[in-house]
Image (cartoon, rainbow, N blue to C red):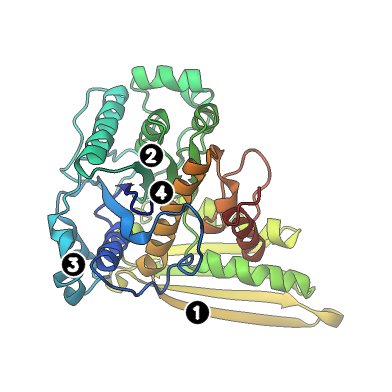
Amino acid sequence: MNMADRVGVAVVGLGGAVATTAAAGIEMIRAGSNDLQGLPLADRAVRGMVDYRDLHFGGWDLGGDDLATAARRHGVIGDRELDDGAAGLSQMMPWPAVGSTDFCVNIDGANKIVAGSHRGAVERIQADMRRFREEKSLDRLVVVNLASTERLPDATAPSLATLEAFERGLDANDPAISPAMLYAYAAIDADTPYANFTPSVAADVAPLADFAARRNVAVAGKDGKTGQTFIKTVIAPALRDRALHVDGWFSTNILGNSDGLALDDPQSLASKLGTKTSVLDQILGYPVENHIVMIHYYKPRGDNKEAWDNIDLTGFLGQKMQLKLNFLCKDSVLAAPLAIEIARCLDLAHQRGDGGVQEQMGVFFKLPQTRGGVPVHGFGEQQLILDRWLDGDK
């Protein structure tokens, strides 16, 4: 591959904290910074993988502010960065987005796609993708969903059963089809790799997973594994291998960014909790009866999330023990590098002709999408699977 190949990253939710942080980081690298700290694959020389400097961000958002203004509002990136290496963010404007307060109650904006039907919205999304490729002279494109968490759809809706029914639902403007699904369909239909960094149902719904397999389009998801669940999937395998029985695991989070605001709605929260609570039983090999996960929106904290865990254990001779963890982190600083690496891996899969669900990318997600099997959750095992794929092993 010509290392000067230009790859576009079309982001759903471009004005959010994660997307603006990712875009700012790439702008600073392109401006001459050699600081690749925090990027998980920065030290890997993988043949065919696009260089960080050759990634170009664009995308959709319900808010119409330029990315520098949005970044200042989120408070993750400082003025020095925005006035220096990331100054290009002031020239980046989000495209009108598909939005639905039915699926995401607390998130809305005036920068909306006006389309008479789902099919019309898909056509607008694809027109944006084509224009992005042309204006930026891109060689390839990937789509990454970094938008706010949607509520769970009605799983019994006929349009979500088969691809043919989904196609009819698009034409009939079926309310069971969510914005996340529209973006996923638009990408797959345009033979463009798609990743879902959110807990929302998208390319994992049966018709779209089938569509990606039929078209041999790389898809991956879902829900980026950034903080508390990342730590959980590191520690749980160690407790299992040392025969320390987990009697209970209490997890709570407080955060005040737009992700937290979206999760202040009980229906969106249910989507998130579904991905966060799925990991322990698979890793440990037994059900953890008292596994509790709580998320609270606390505006003063902003992007500075606090994740607190209490783990009750039983060891040798039935002795009881406790493990307590307190992770004080910047949510978007953890998430943005993963979004960047996901885009690079998706592009590499596309170049290799690897279509359908990319199971080797499970290390990046709380609920890894599979081709039908049980997902692997343990971090160490997931990392080995990714490493083997990066090295060219199937």
Disc 3 + disc 4, Cβ < 8 Å: no
Q: Does 352 sit above or below residue 254?
A: above
Q: Secondary structure at mark 3?
A: helix
Q: Quadrant of residue 384?
A: bottom right
Coordinates of residue 74 in the picture (x, y in percent): 24, 65
Estimate the spatial distance between the alpha carbons at disc 3 and disc 4, rounded to whole Å: 26 Å
Residue at the right extreme, as displayed: 317
First reached walking from the N terminus: tag 3 or tag 2:
3
Coordinates of residue 85 in the picture (x, y in percent): 20, 70
Q: Amino acid at mark 2?
A: Ala
User: What residue does disc 3 label?
Assistant: 72
The residue drawn where x is 33% and y is 22% is 173
User: What residue does disc 1 label?
Assistant: 326
Q: Amino acid at mark 1?
A: Asn
Number of the front mark, 1 or 2 = 2
Coordinates of residue 123 in the picture (x, y in percent): 28, 26
Q: Amino acid at mark 4?
A: Ser
Q: Which mark is residue 268?
A: 4
Estimate the spatial distance between the alpha carbons at disc 3 and disc 2, rounded to whole Å: 26 Å
Report the front residue among 378 and 155. Answer: 378
Q: Is residue 377 visible?
A: no
The residue drawn where x is 52% and y is 32% is 216
Badge 4: how crowded within 10 Å, few (<14), some, or many (20+)?
A: many
First reached walking from the N terminus: tag 2 or tag 4:
2
Q: Quadrant of residue 295?
A: bottom left
The residue drawn where x is 59% and y is 76% is 310
Q: Which mark is residue 180?
A: 2
